[in-house]
Image (cartoon, rainbow, N blue to C red):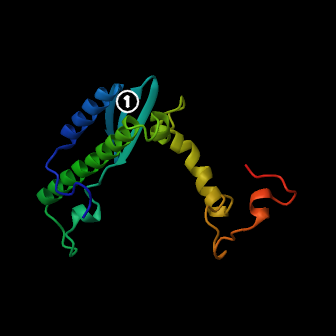
Amino acid sequence: MRYASGTSVSAERTREQMMRILRQFGADGFGYAERHLQGAVQFQYHKIPVQFRVRLPSRSDDGIACTDTGRERSANQREQFWQRETNRRWRAVFLVIKALLVGVEEGVITFEEAFLPYIVWQDGRTTADILLPPIQAAAESGALPLLLPEQAGPPRVETGPSAVLGKKGTRHA
């Protein structure tokens, strides 16, 4: 089941709740926008501009225009399903923001670490807009290091004096 699929909370109410929790955390300069199939919520925290984007559903999306069996919905049904999906997506954005703020509040991560991908630069792009294309290209080309070796077998464990002293007899820190 998708997150908040049965929500009765409107997108407007969700955005109000987002603004309230952000204000409690010390953010200001709030705003939101919807254009075409893109939504955004923006705020500032200690002069750092932040923007979260959400892809909004189209009334012609398969899950909105048609039933699970492929039968076309009426215009009224499409509107209801579209509104529910719009509300659900805004709830998901609220969940992400709230979870990040809890992580910051609990000292798990700093604000800058938590919100780094969403920080807006002077040219209007977010950090994610700037960094994701080269990261994706590096991942596709194999230029990023593997964290775990593929098919390398079990890790080799050294024992004896060389494990502590090293090859020349100097102690490892």
From the viewer's side, name the closer residue of 26 and 84. 26
> In the rendered view, does 152 fall on the left or right side of 168?
left
Q: Position of residue 79 (x, y in %)?
A: 17, 54
Q: Is residue 65 above or below residue 21?
A: below
Write the residue at 20% across / 76% down: 69
- Tell me the amino acid under the disc marked 1: Phe
Residue closest to the far right: 168
Q: Position of residue 45 (x, y in %)?
A: 41, 27
Write the residue at 81% across / 58% down: 166
Circle 1 SS class:
strand
> In the rendered view, does 5 fall on the left or right side of 48?
left
Q: Quadrant of the N terminus?
A: bottom left
> In the rendered view, does 40 fall on the left or right side of 84?
right
Q: Residues within 10 Å of mark 1 (few under 14, many from 20)?
A: many
Q: Position of residue 118 (x, y in %)?
A: 46, 39
Q: Position of residue 155 (x, y in %)?
A: 65, 70
Looking at the image, can residue 39 be seen?
A: no
Q: Quadrant of residue 142?
A: bottom right
Looking at the image, can residue 86 be seen?
A: yes
Write the residue at 23% across / 36% down: 17
Q: Is residue 116 above or below residue 83?
A: above
Q: Is residue 48 above or below residue 117?
A: above
Write the residue at 13% across / 49% down: 8
Q: Quadrant of residue 102?
A: top left
User: Badge 1 is on which residue?
Assistant: 43
